Amino acid sequence: MSVKKTAQWLSVELTTSHQSHYNTLFMIRLLQKVTLALSILIIPIGSYSQTISLKSDNQHLEETFNWAVEKALSWKMSGKYGEINRHERSEGLGFKVEVPYLPSYWAGYAHRSAYYIRDFAHQIAGAHLVGMDEENYAMMEKFAEYTTTDKQWYSWWALNFDGSVFTLDAPNPPGTESYTGYPAHFINKPGESFVREIPAMFELVEKAWKSYLWTGDIRYIENSALWNMYEKVVTDFVTLHDANKNGIPEGHGNIFEGSSTYNEADIYPLEAGDAIGAQYQAYLAYAAFLSERNLNKQANEQVERAVTLKKYFNTNWSIADGTDLYSCALTSSGEKYPLFNKETSWFMPMKLLTEPGKRNDAYLDFISEQLGDGVGTANPKEGSPANIEAYTYLPDTYFPYGRVEEAWKWMQYIIDQKDKPHVVKQQGKNGDYPEVSFTLVSQVVEGLMGVEPDAANHMISTLPRMPNEIGHLDLDRLKIGDHTIAVYQSNRKTEITHSVGDQPLTAKIRFYGNHDAILVNNKKTKAKKASLNGINFSYITVKLQAGEKVEASI
C-alpha cells in the first residue's frame, strides 16, 4: 500500500490478544469509505506554535508536563559543537573537544556525551511530541548503519552526537588502539568486546514502526539501511543467537559478552522475558512494514511468527512448576525463574506478550507487591529499583490494561522524585536523566489520553484513562504527520479539533465500557464495540476537515 494514497482507512480493533497497546491497525487494514453522517462544528483556523502544551485542572501535572517539554528540548544536540567520548572517567578513547554534531538528542546519562539504544527507544515518542522527528530518524538511521554481520547483527550500544562509536561501551572498536582503562578480559579481538543487550535490537524495529505511525515519514519504508536492519534483526539475528533452536535468541553472560535482558544487575539468564516481549513486537512491526510495501504474503508470515511465539511463551516457556506466576527467565543452568527480576518481569505484560486474563492480572499484582511504593518512600521493597529511569517503564506497563490508578501512581512517583539526587552522583538530579522528561510527555499523551496515531492514513484514536485526581486534560498542538490537533478529554467526554492539515483527519473516539450510543455533537449516535487487551470499549469514527471540531460524550 502506498503511503501517498489518500483513500480513507479504518483500523480494525482486534479482539485477539496479540495487539499492540500503541496501535493495533498494522495487524489488519481494511479499505473502507467513511460513511458516518455526523454534524461537524466549524472553528476558525489560526496560526499555531510548534510546541505541544497542556492545560489541566491538576495544576501539578500541568506544570510538570510543561517542564518536561522544555527539559526534553534542552537535550537537543542538533547543529551544536561539543565533546565526544566524554564520560565519568574523564576523557575516553577518541576524546575530542569541538566536534560538529548531527541531528540527535541526549539519551542516557547526562555525564556521558552519547545516546544509547535502550534510552533512545524509550524516548522516541516523547521526542516526536516535542518536535524532534528529524533527530529520531537520523539516530535510527545511524544505529541501522552500524547493524552489521561482523557484529552478528548487533548495532553499537551507544553513539556520540557526531554519529561515531561511543568508546566507553566499545573499548576496542575496529580501527583503534586498545583502551588501557579497561580490564584485560574486556579486550578481545577488535570489535568483539562491546555492550550488547538482546531486547534493544528488537526495540529498534518496533520503535521505527512507531515513528512511522507518528510521522508517516516514507523514509522509514524506503531507506535501505533501515530496511536491512528490520529484516536482519527478525531473521539472521534470531538464528545466529538461537543455539537451542526454540526460536528465542540467547545471551552469553554480562553486558560485554551479550546480555539476554535489560536487567544488568541481578542474574545473567540464558533467555529473558523482556527480550521475548520485544521480539514479539518486532515481528508485528516488521509485518506492518512489509504490508506497507504490499508484501502481504510475507507480512502474514511475520504475524504468524508473532502468534506462534506468543503461544509458546504462554503455554510452555513461562510455565514453572509450583506457581501460576510467569517464569521471566531461563537460567544458564536451564532452570525456570518465576521470581521478580525488574525489567525482565514487567516488560512481558508491557509488550503485550502475556495473555489478558486472571494470570496476567495476578502477575501485574505481583509486580506491584514487589515494588512497594518505590525507593525513597515509606514503603520500599527489596525489588524496588534504585535508579529512577527503571520506574519510567511502569506507567507503560499498567496503562494498556486499564489499571489507571497504578499507572498514575508511578507517574506521580517519578514527578515527586525528579528533584532528588540520582543514585549515580555524577548524574545530578533524577530529573536530569533525559528519559524522565521524554517519557513524562509521552505518558500523558499515549497513557492518560490513550492517543494512537496513524499519520500515513491521516487518523487519530483516543481513549481517556484518567485517575481520580485528574478531571480533564486539554492538549494543544499535537502533531500527527502533517496534521496539528487539539484534544480535550475527561473520562466521559472527548473533543478533537483538527486545527491544521491538508487532508481530512479520521478521528476514532473510544470510551471504556459497553455503550449502545455515544452523544456526538449533541446527537445520539450508535456506538460500535470492540476489545483492547481484554477490556471492552465503545467507539465512533468521524472525519474532520481542517478547522472542524467534534465533541463526543457518554
Image (cartoon, grey):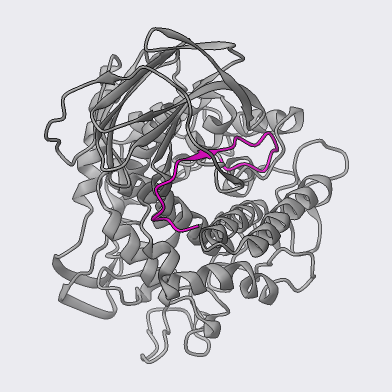
Relative image position of residue 173 (x, y in whole percent)? 41, 84
Judged from this view, the residue extending furthest toward the right is 321
Q: Say above or below: 504 vs 353.
A: above
Q: Say above or below: 82 vs 276.
A: below
Residue at 49% from the left image edge and 32% from the top image edge: 374
Relative image position of residue 167 (x, y in whole percent)? 36, 76
Highlighted range, magenta: 1-20
Task: Report the number of numbered marks.
Answer: 0
Q: Is residue 385 in view? A: yes
Residue 103 figure quarter: bottom left
In this rendered view, identify the residue nearer to me: 119 or 310.
Answer: 310
Residue 2 figure quarter: bottom left
Prevailing secondary structure of the magenta residues: loop
In this rendered view, identify the residue nearer to me: 12 or 78.
Answer: 12
Relative image position of residue 265 (x, y in whole percent)? 55, 55
Residue at 16% from the left image edge and 24% from the top image edge: 44
Q: Is residue 110 in view? A: no
Relative image position of residue 84 (x, y in whole percent)? 24, 72
- The reply, left or right, for residue 20 in relation to residue 473 is right
Q: Say above or below: 234 vs 303.
A: below
Residue at 34% from the left image edge and 73% from the top image edge: 166
**Residue 308 among magenta residues:** no
**Residue 14 among magenta residues:** yes
In this rendered view, identify the residue nearer to me: 28 or 54.
Answer: 28
